[in-house]
Amino acid sequence: MRHLLSPLDFSVEELDNLLNLAADIEHNPDKYKEICKGKKLATLFYEPSTRTRLSFEAAMLNLGGNVLGFSSADSSSASKGESVSDTIRIISCYADICAMRHPKEGAPLVAASRSSIPVINAGDGGHQHPTQTLTDLMTIKSLKGRLDHLVIGLCGDLKFGRTVHSLINALVRYPGIKFVLISPKELRIPDYIRQDVLEANSVEYQEVEHLEDVLGSLEILYMTRVQRERFFNEEEYIRLKDSYILNSEKMALANKDMLVLHPLPRVNEISVEVDDDDRAAYFKQVQYGVYVRMALILTLLDISVNEPGN
Ligand code: NCD
C-alpha cells in the first residue's frame, strides 16, 4: 500500500506517469467516469480549505466514487481529544483512501503508520503540500511544455509557505532549474530547504528582496500569500502582509510569456486587474488540480482503466 506524504514519495518516472494519466483524464473524461464506482474517499480536514478539499471531493465524484469526511477539527472527535492515530484506524473501516490536512507537521505521517488505507497529505502545517505540487507540475508541464530548464521565481512567504517547500523539493530533480527566491528577509526560505535541498542538489538559486529587480528574467512567477495563521505575532504579520503586490504595472516589466501561478487563496498579493492578463494561470491551475487528484486516487488505489471489471 502506498501513501503520498511528500512529493519525493514518487520517482521522476512515476511522476511522469501520473502527469500523463492526468492529461489523459483531461482529454478523455468519459473513460474514467465510473472507474471508482463503489469506492469511498474520506477527507479529514483539521484546518480550513476550499480548493484542496473540494477538488479531492470533485475528483472522486468525477471518477464515480463517493466521499465522506469533516472540514474542521471542531466538527470531529479531535475536539473531544481523539488522537490522529485512533481517528485513522476508525476511518480505515469506512473508506478506501483518505486525504488529511492538519496544522501539525508530520500528522499525516503518523496517520499513515497506523492506517490500512492510503493516506494523502493534503497539507501539514508549514511543512509540505504534495498535491498542490502535483497541481503546479501539471500546470507548468501543460502550459510550458516541460519541467526542466526553467527560471522560476518564488515570491512572498517562503518561510511558512508549504506549497513552496514541496515545489522546490519536486523540481530540484529536473535538470536546468534555476530558482529566484523573492521574499522579505524575515520570510526567507528555511535553512533546511536551502542547505538540504537546494545546496545538496547543487541547484542554482538567488535570494532577492525586490520583485521588480528580477521580473524580467523569470519564465514562471509563483506568488504566495503571507501565512497569517503561522505567525506568532499579529503586528509582524501586518507589517509584512503587503510586501508584494503584483499589478499591471509590474506585469509590464515581465516577459511576454512568463506564467503567473498562485496556489490560492490570494489576499492582496495579486491585483484583480492581473486576472485578465493572458499570463495569469492561477485559475487554470485550479482545474489542473482536479485532473491530477483524479490521477493520484487511481494510482494509489492501483486502479487502471484497462482492468476488467472496472
Ligand atoms: C495553500 C495551502 O493551504 O497551503 N492553499 C491551497 O491548498 N491551495 C496555500 C495557502 O493557504 O496560502
Image: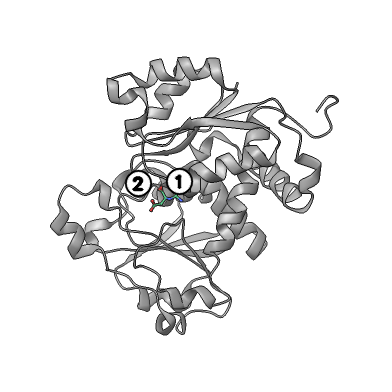
Closer mark to the observer between disc 1 and disc 2: 1
Give percent across and percent down for residue 223.
Answer: 42, 63
**Above or below 243: residue 136:** above
- Identify the residue shown where x is 72% and y is 47%: 20
Instruction: Report the front residue among 94 and 145.
Output: 94
Residue 18, visible in the rendered structure:
yes
User: Whole-percent x and y of residue 60?
Assistant: 63, 37
Asked if residue 194 lies left or right of residue 140, the reply is left
Q: What element carries label 2?
A: helix
Task: Return the x and y of residue 51 as percentages of the image width and height.
Answer: 49, 49
What numbered label is drawn on residue 195? 2
Q: For this view, does 181 lie left or right of residue 61?
A: left
| Residue 174 in sight | no
Residue 277 is labelled as none
Residue that badge 1 annotates: 166
Against 191, is 77 above or below? above
Residue 213 x %, y %: 36, 78
Q: Which amino acid does label 2 sit on?
A: Gln
Going from N to C along the chain, the mark reached first, 1 or 2, is: 1
Circles 1 and 2, Cβ within 8 Å, touching? The answer is: no
In the rendered image, which quarter contains the C terminus? top right
- Element type where label 1 sits in the image: helix
Residue at image position (47%, 15%) is 90
